[in-house]
Structures are given as C-alpha cells and as structure tokens.
Amino acid sequence: MELVGDRAEAEVTASTGRSAITRFANSNIHQNVAEDHLGVRLRLVADGRLAGSSTNRTDADGLSRLVETTFAAAALRPRDERWPGTASPAAAPPVEHWDPPTARAPAEGRAEVVKAFVDAGSGLSAAGYCSSNGYEVYFANSGGQRVGGRATSATVDGIHRALPDSDGSGWQSTLGLGALDGARAGAEAAAKARAGIDALELLPGRYEVVLEPACVADLLDFVVGYGFSAKAHAERRSFVRLGEPQFDPAISIADDATDPRSPSLAFDAEGTPRRRLDLVLAGVPTGLLHDRRSAAQAGAQSTGHGIAGGESYGPAPSTLVLAPGASSASELIAGVERGLLVSEFWYTRILDPKTQVVTGLTRNGVGLIEGGEVTRAVRNLRFTQSYAEALAPGNVVAVGSDARLRGGDAIVPSLHLASWHFTGGARG
C-alpha cells in the first residue's frame, strides 16, 4: 500500500478463552452466563503514524478487513514522534498459571461453590457471584518477538444479610475453581452479618485500624497505579520520590506476574517479558513501572507493564504483592487498644494524585476494637485519607501474615495502621 513507505511495524495479539459467572441473590441462583471469545488485535505504525483496532472475525475476510481498516485509520493520524519501536525477541519466564478443569468449568461446578456459601449462613439472605475464567494469548510482532501464555482464575465473592440491614462479606480468589472453599467464605460473611445487628453510630475522627486484605488491595491499587507509573512520574503527577524513605520500613511492594498465586501472563501487551519488579524495599521506593514508550523517554528498559491503549494511559501493574509480616489476623486485632476492624472499602475516588488523598466508604463489616477484642459492630463510615500518609514511616504498626489473592491483581495481607481519618457517616 502507498501509505507504508519504506517501513511498517506491526504487533498482533490473538486471544481465546471462556469467561463464566454464576450470580445469586436472595440465596438463590438467578443467572448463569458463559462467553467463549476469540479475537485478534492489530497495532501498527506506517509512515510514522500509529493506529490499532481489533476484531472477533478470524476468517480470512475478517483478518483482511482488520488490516485494511487499521491502515486506513493510520493514514488519518498525525505522526507519532515518540513511537519507541516494537519489542525485540526475548523469552518470557516459564510460568504456568493454568488449571485445566477451570478453563472450561461447567455451571454445576460454580453452583456447588454457591450452595456451600449460601448454606453457611442458615437463616440469612445471601447474594454475590462465583466466576471461572480461562484464556490463552499469543503475541507476534514484525521485529521477530513471539510469545504465548495462558492463565485461569476463579472467585467467589458475596454477602450474607441479617435483617434489617446488616451485611457481611466473604470472598476467595484462586487459580482453580476446585480450590475455592465456598463454605469458609460464606461462614466469614455470615459471622460478620450476625455481628452487625444493632450497630453503633460512631463519631467521625481519627482511629487506629486493622484493614483486611480487600481494603489493602484497594490501597495498593491507588498508591501504585497513580504513583509508580513512569509516565505519571515524568509528568510530575506522582508523589513518588525514588530513594527516599517515604513508607514505613515494614512496607515492601513488588509487581510480580511470576508469583505462583498470580493469574497474570508472563508478558505484557507489547510482548515484553514480565519479571518481578521491586517497587518499594523496606519503605524506600526503588523502581517505576515502564512500558516501551516511557522507557524510551527515560533512557531505561521496559519492565513489562505495557497495556492496550498505553500510549494514552501509560504503564500499569499486573500483580501487586505486599510482603507479609509475622502477625496473624487475630494478633493484629489484639494489638489495638481502641480502633476499627474494616472489611472492605467501596466507591473509592482519588481527590489528589500528588498527595494520594482518597475518599470512600466502608461496607460489609466494620467492628469496634476495644482492649484487643472486637466488641460490637459499627455503622458504615465515610473516610478522606491520604493513602501515602497511611503507609508513611511510623504509621504502620504491623503487617499480617494472611496474604491472599484479591481478584486478579493483588496478593496482600491485613495491615494494622496507627491512624485513619473517618470524616462522617455513610449518609454524610
């Protein structure tokens, strides 16, 4: 084609798999959905102009149409002066995050997990979902890079409700559906729901907190997503100062798609292999997430964190890992004289990326800790808190030993923090 000129570069990603979910409400399954997907994504640079598009038509006509429309789109774009070129050939780490029965699990397997969850809360009303996913991805570019991988994952996540309005949550995420313990997750949710009847209305203020893993996953998502992106750092939108002790020495954070608990692929959307990347070591930021574009601008190497659309958004984490401590969850609670045990955050929104101030709500289980014991439930609260400040030197009292996978992108334990700023009730 005339547009090609002397050279065109291209990346092709082909993916296939199945995503399935079983939803339940009022303690009954009301929906089973499974989707088989097969698709191809093409990104190319022709005459210095970048464009990308995708299709689920994988016959010859569909693929020809994909190429034609992508070239046509490129012709309408301005030259991309910061195009870093395609990834060079390099082998991805030999990880295998794959459980064959989960990849194409029937609805009956998810229904068994749901039944166990529901049965664990006799007399309560349960709602939530159980999902099972499996996908394979293959990548090739015009520079000779060829990589492929596959992964599975499964999650049960739900609540039990005790009338009139006390909800408690329980969840598990694993690589295999067979490893989900619906009864254990359901029992956790039921215990919180029963404990939440006649909850206390607590005054706003600063409280010591024990944050359970679901809260910690949310915390890391903001801290790393907004702070450790090399694009955000170069544009001075990040709070991170490399080499300075910005976090408590108890905090070490890595991004590690090779962790055996991770459902991530061992390469990114640009075909760059992923390996463990230390972001914070003993409280000191040591690294940033790079894709090929941010690395080229910084004179660095991509860390394997490119994503589709990264030319606009920049690099993103794959699987965040917070190093666990030595304290059990019960020991974390025992270390609090007066504070709060928080199960989940909800509707969290960042107010200022530079200070990491986030606002949000608690939900599905908040307990008042007095004298090292949870004495009664507390009504949901709104908070406005700098996540970076919460992890600052002197503010992390202890790190739990209960690290587990949350969703598909974080492996985190509970945290005992010295202070958390609650600014009002859930209605205010």
Image (tube, helix red, strand yellow):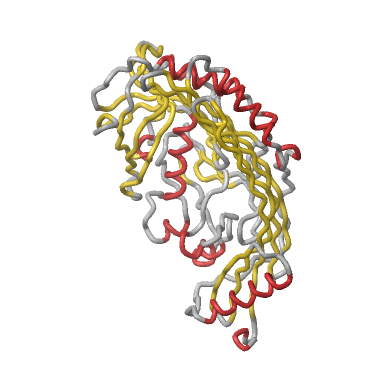
State which quadrant residue 303 falls in: bottom right
Q: Quadrant of the N terminus?
A: bottom right
At a point 41% along the width and 41% down the height, the residue shown is 245
Left or right placement of residue 114 versus residue 101 in this view: left
Q: Quadrant of residue 182?
A: top right
Q: Position of residue 220 (x, y in %)?
A: 46, 40
Identify whether 76 is placed above or below 98.
below
Residue found at x 56% / y 24%: 185
Q: Position of residue 269 (x, y in %)?
A: 61, 58
- The quadrant in which the C terminus is found is top left
Give whichever of 200, 167 is nearer the camera.
167
In this rendering, the answer to whether 168 lies above or below 306 is above
Q: Is residue 376 above or below residue 263?
A: above
Horizontal placement of 262 versus 146: left or right? Answer: left
The relative height of residue 115 versus residue 252 in the rendered view (above or below) is above
The percent position of residue 148, horizontal first and vertical second, equals 72, 55
The front one of 88 and 204 is 204
User: Where's residue 248, x and y in %?
Assistant: 42, 34
Q: Is 300 left or right of 178, judged from the image as shown? A: left
